[in-house]
Amino acid sequence: MRRDQAEDECAAPRHDGRRGFLKCAAGIAGVAAAGIGGPAAAAADRPVGGLRDGGLLPDKVPFHGDHQAGIVTPQQLFAGFVGFDVLAQDRDGLISLFQRLTRRSRVLAAGVKPQDEQVASEEPTPDSLSITLGVGASLFDDRFGLSGHKPRHLKAMPAFPDDRLEPARCHGDLSLQVCAQHPDAVVHVLRDLARETEGLLRPRWRADAFLNPSRPSGSPRTFVGFKDGIVNPDTGSAREMDRLLWVTPPCGEPDWALGGSYQVLRLIRFQIEKWDKVPLARQEKIFGRRKASGAPLDGTRESDVPRYREDPHGSKIPLNSHIRLANPRTEKTENSRFLRRSYNYDAGYDSKGQMDLGLVFCGYQQDPERQFATVQRRLRHEPLSEFITPIGGGYFFILPGVRDADDWFGSRLLQKT
Ligand SMILES: C=CC1=C(C)c2cc3[nH]c(cc4nc(cc5[nH]c(cc1n2)c(C)c5CCC(=O)O)C(CCC(=O)O)=C4C)c(C)c3C=C
Ligand SMILES: [Fe+2]
């Protein structure tokens, strides 16, 4: 497929029924990079799409639009999160970097064959690919003349109490989120973009991540065994998204940032050996939900809405349970809700023989302080904190969408300033 042909296809997604970046899913063994192992391979065989909000995941996630793909897009099964530092020396170098990233992402999202044909042995399809680019506060220093143009709420992720942040797994000038239905597609995109941006970018950290099966149905489960992602703002409601997610006027943000969103990434490791000794009834009180069904402790189904007002003393759903602290469902706390789009990671064993697995927590919002950090502070003394340790991540600003074939990531930031 020619490059211009691929670009045309971005605008008019085609549903040809084929799934998978490579038809030969067995090929994933060769690219089972750190953090992706058995569970990932197993999940690749599951039916795909429609994992969140009941929405169907198209074969081709449209690349062009007011907002970037990969945010309100129903969650694909696999994700790679990377923090990069920019090596470009000056503003022209940065423009060139953003234009290259745009060109190649546009082509990849349309499903063009990866360049490495030794690995991609069959004709590929787009694999529901989304590539989402963010910028960190460090990009707005004096290297590129951007210091007066930082999004209003963008700052380096602070260390919260109980964090054990490892510098090598934090921050970055850029963040890249690549999501697809197979793990090899994520790796191919990272390889392809590395080739395209050689000398302009240096990776700082990477987290490979995936969704576990729902078991038996409904929302997927994290490694603590509970269904996660049950409650989220309504991505189908433009009004709700404009209120909680997208940078929308009036907001005091620079014009170039309208249509963007703030991404909070947190690599959170589980003390899983400790967790596995906790009796079921206590685990359920810690989350406020039933482990088997996902139902709130005052209900019977995953979709049941907890009725906190009828349980003011927490006799059914403890006042310090995860869901009750995270979202008390009051008028006052409504403004701190945000969209979660998290994945699991499994990085094997550490040097002490402990399992290194957990959550790549990913949240999208209008203001990390008003939303993520407020919720994080409410969760400070929750019983779950004994079993989890945040070890990395960062705050990023997701650039507005690439509008059409002539547009590119960050064009309004770099053309105007
Ligand atoms: C600061 C925000 C949050 C962090 C950090 C966080 C960590 C974390 N969460 C789970 C597992 C679950 N979280 C659930 C719900 C939930 N969590 C947050 C926020 C943070 N979680 C919110 C806002 C909510 C929704 C609450 C609601 O509206 O009712 C659930 C329940 C299922 C669901 O609604 O998705 C689980 C399970 C882990 C394991 C974890 C850290 C590793
Ligand atoms: Fe949570």
Image (tube, rainbow, N blue to C red):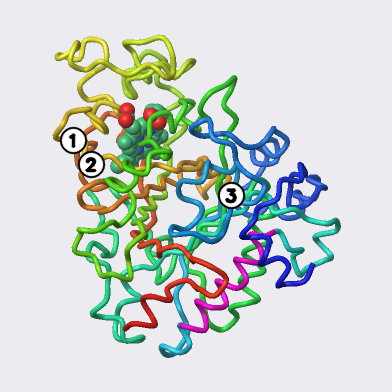
* Mark sitting on residue 333: 1
Disc 1 Cβ-to-ligand 1 distance below 8 Å: no
For the residue labelled by badge 2, is the local secondary structure a helix, a strand or a loop? helix
Q: Residue at x 50, y 52 (%)?
A: 70
Q: Residue 287 versus residue 246: which sits nearer the camera?
A: 246
Q: Residue 307 versus residue 171: which sits nearer the camera?
A: 307
Q: Residues within 10 Å of mark 1 (few under 14, many from 20)?
A: some
Q: Position of residue 48 (x, y in %)?
A: 66, 36
Q: Residue at x 75, y 49 (%)?
A: 28
Q: Position of residue 194 (x, y in %)?
A: 61, 73
- Marks 3 and 2 sit apart, C-alpha to C-alpha, by 31 Å
- Residue 282: image quadrant is top left
- In the image, the segment drawn in magenta is 95-110
Q: Residue at x 52, y 80 (%)?
A: 97
Q: CB under 8 Å between callouts 3 and 2?
A: no
**Amino acid tagged 1:** Thr
**Amino acid tagged 2:** Ser
